[in-house]
Amino acid sequence: MKVTVRLFATLKDFFPKNQKKVLVELEAGSTVNEVVEYFGIPQTTPLIIKVNGRSGSKSTVLKDGDRVGIFPPVGGG
Amino acid sequence: MKIYRVNMTEGKVTTEDVKQDYVALGGRGLTSQIIADEVDPTCNPIGAKNKLVIAPGLLSGTNAPSSGRLSVGTKSPLTGTIKESNAGGTAAQKLAKLNVKAIVVEGKPEDNKFYTMTVNKDGIKLEDVSDNLLGKGNYEVMEKVQEELGEDVCVMSIGQAGEYKLQSASIAVSDPEGRPTRHCGRGGTGAVMGSKGLKTIVIDDTDAPGVSIVDKDKFKKSARGLAKALLDHPVCGEGLPEYGTSILINILNESGGLPTKNFRTGRFEGADKISGETIADVIKERGGQTAHVCHPGCVMRCSQIYNDKDGNYLTGGFEYETVWGFGANSEIDDIDAIAMMDRICDDIGVDTIEMSTTIAVAMEAGIIEFGDAEGAIDLLKQIGEGTPLGRIIGNGTGFTGKAFGLTRVPVVKNQSIPAYDPRAVKGVAVTYATSTMGADHTAGYAVTANILGIGGDVDPLSKEGQVALSRDLQIATAAVDSTGLCVFAAFAILDNEVALPAVVDMLNAQYGIELVADDVTKLGESILKAERDFNVRAGFDNSDDRLPDFFLEEECSPHNVKFDITDEELDEVYNF
Ligand code: SF4
């Protein structure tokens, strides 16, 4: 299956340069953690995860066509 | 500490001791209490009976981190409710060092002249400046004052919008570089200042006595504790200084809560082009500055200095709500154009949130097209020129919506709804509906638990838990707004159990009192009650605590959600 991944803020360092989103091919039943590993983001990095615009976690199970956004802790307002 | 009373009808200044009831109050707690005690709630906000109260926070002027926020209170010309408008800049610290607890401006000059009020160690003086400052924008006013009095004075001023008494007029407060980038933005406080015949307030703290602290060692220790809690927090210590507040563009867009095209959808095609990441890149490329402070001693440093293509200063204190409003909500993805709009608003002295939602409503009305940056810039300039159309725009979103017969007008109590769609971020929607201030995200920033995973997790799309979340945050925020601490300190307070006790310890050490954490909640509750009571006496009731119909009737994509929290549920917010 394929999911679209976007990494933001400091996590952009783990992304191919100048790319806004990446299509990642994963085995069926994969979780967000596989995405985190795919990009080599250290497990200790605190992350805010959105799957299809909803709050998710590393253990969220993904399905084909999902949109995954991963952020470091951010805030403002 | 003392309270100055400045009567503009007679041009007379009197000094008062702080009465016992006010000793433990500061910032919003004090401005709201004075307004509630002294102002007739039914008065005309730009008439002689309204008052403008200016107060530093309880901790302002000390070396407590990020504690230099200023509160300005009045009856709002925009909402007709009580108003506290909070700003950074250097005013609060200087006032506190001059031992000024509050300045109460009352009356109205009969000669229609404009004055400068100078506050220094000798007291307060008024001077007629109708000839040299009238009609000028905030940038020129601040430059002129600083040329004369030096760069270290703080200047608070109104631009043309305040002189015209437009309902979105702001009061500018100079930042450490002396520029008008920080504003008491919301609610038209600038119109009240204009109605009092005040063009500028100059604060000079040369040889000021400074803030007295009962237990200096204890204070220092607690201040360090809070600074550490702020710096250790990933948002306060890293995210804000590195990217500024516009870091929120992408996460709100990803979450489907970034209002786009006058609150039609929750995602904007051009989000990345106006994101905090892009802005930070542009700033670095052009030799601007990230991690700028709005007042000395802020450790979170969310402010920025933004240069134009040629590397010359264009604007500062460029914030998420502004970028969202002139950007996504107006379908403009040109960050330089948005920065220019921010600059114009700061100069004319209008609230950027109110103006950006008004521009989108003007687009809705067909005055200009969605996405038309040049047209938007022209409309904003017209406010300063005082054209009839400019005056309509400058009176805000509700006024403009009425002038053009629209129903898609995002306001509560006539104040415009900011940068989080109420359907997709329901906790903050409860705050918009029920805040004593009209639609105001800062009054109970439920975006924390709804979107950012700060202080817990509450699903933003479900109605579960939103009322309690908003209520608790509104209470806590009223208290924080009294300390002079920046509301962003709340991120650390919500996540780090050391932070709140540090704040309480500082208050105890400074004032020689014995507060416990519970008293903070009590303070917040009593402030909200006093504010709500003022609004009730002004003629507001529960039926004013509602969102515009279209949020209940139309779905917001991508989640296709409506606002579904019932009136009865909203009315629960004040059950405390
Ligand atoms: S965090 Fe930003 S708004 Fe708050 S006090 Fe610091 S610079 Fe000012």
Image: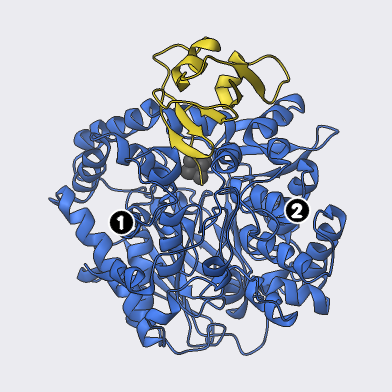
Chain colours: A yellow, B blue
Q: Which mark is residue B479?
A: 1
In the depicted structure, whether residue B540 falls above or below residue B210? below
Question: Of the numbered discs in the image, which one, if any, rests on residue B42?
Answer: none
Is residue B303 among what the camera can see? no
Q: Residue at x 26, y 43 (%)?
A: B503
* Crowd band around label 2 with a 10 angstrom C-alpha radius: few (<14), some (14–19), many (20+): many
**Ligand 1 is within 8 Å of the C-beta of the residue at disc 1:** no
Taking B576 as reference, is B274 above or below it?
Answer: above
- In depth, the one of B332 and B150 nearer the eye is B332
Asked if one can make out residue B348 in the rendered structure from this viewpoint, the answer is yes
**Subunit under mark 2:** B
* Rendered image quadrant of residue B111: bottom right
Residue type, mark 2 in image: Met
* Residue at 73%, 36% in the rendered image: B273
Mark 2 sits on what residue? Answer: B341
Going from N to C along the chain, the mark reached first, 2 or 1, is 2
Find residue B223 and report its horizontal and vertical position in percent: 30, 35
Chain ID of residue with mark 1: B
Residue at the (44%, 17%) spot, across then down: A33
Is the Cβ of the residue at disc 2 closer than 8 Å to that at disc 1? no
Q: Quadrant of residue B525?
A: bottom left
Q: Amino acid at mark 1?
A: Ala
In the image, B450: left or right of B225?
A: right
Near-viewer residue (B220 or B17): B220
